[in-house]
């Protein structure tokens, strides 16, 4: 079973986390099921950028981003070549190392970020 290693993030997982997941789950769902409260303002429908993550290792094991996902990534804060929307990135059979960005652009949330 592949592992997802979440690098430490001040707000969501200060100690970092290592979780085992079944292939076929999104990175976002895996995080949420393991008490890592990653934002997902559009309810995981690929309609915002709040669940943006960096896939630091294992990026090539993921299916390519759709054109819609690419369009939203263009609007995300701090995008780099390892960027994906975690609601759209489906775990395959390789381990992943995930970094949650320090900031997110959330035009829906009332909470300050």
Image (spheres, grey):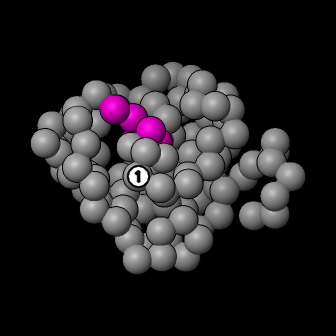
* Residue pointed to by mark 1: 34
Which is nearer the eye, 113 or 22? Answer: 22
Q: Which element carries disc 1, helix, strand or loop?
A: loop
Asked whether residue 103 is in view, the answer is: yes
Rendering coords of residue 14 (x, y %) = 48, 76
Say above or below: 65 vs 40. above
Rendering coords of residue 58 (x, y %) = 23, 49
Residue 101 lies in what quarter of the image? bottom right
Residue 28 is covered by the magenta coloring:
yes
Say above or below: 41 vs 66. below
Tell me which secondary structure the magenta stretch mostly adopts. helix
Which is nearer the eye, 5 or 46? Answer: 5
Rendering coords of residue 36 (x, y %) = 48, 57
In the picture, measured across the screen, residue 68 lies left or right of residue 18, that is right
Rendering coords of residue 103 (x, y %) = 65, 63
Say above or below: 6 vs 70. below
Q: How many numbered callouts?
A: 1
Instruction: Identify the image quadrant of the C terminus.
Output: bottom right
At 28% from the left edge and 28% from the top edge, which residue is drawn?
24
Which is nearer the eye, 81 or 39? Answer: 39
At 39% from the left edge and 35% from the top edge, which residue is drawn?
26
Residue segment shown in magenta: 25-29
Asked whether residue 79 is in view, the answer is: no
């Amino acid at each position: 079973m592949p592992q997802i290693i979440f690098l430490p993030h001040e707000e969501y997982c200060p100690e970092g986390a290592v979780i085992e997941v079944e292939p076929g789950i999104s990175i976002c769902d895996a995080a949420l099921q393991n008490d890592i409260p990653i934002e997902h303002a559009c309810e995981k429908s690929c309609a915002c950028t709040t669940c943006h993550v960096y896939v630091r290792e294992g990026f090539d094991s993921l299916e390519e981003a759709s054109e819609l996902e690419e369009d939203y990534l263009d609007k995300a804060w701090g995008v780099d070549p390892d960027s994906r929307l975690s609601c759209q990135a489906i775990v395959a059979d390789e381990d992943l190392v995930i970094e949650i960005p320090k900031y997110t652009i959330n035009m829906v949330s009332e909470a300050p970020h």
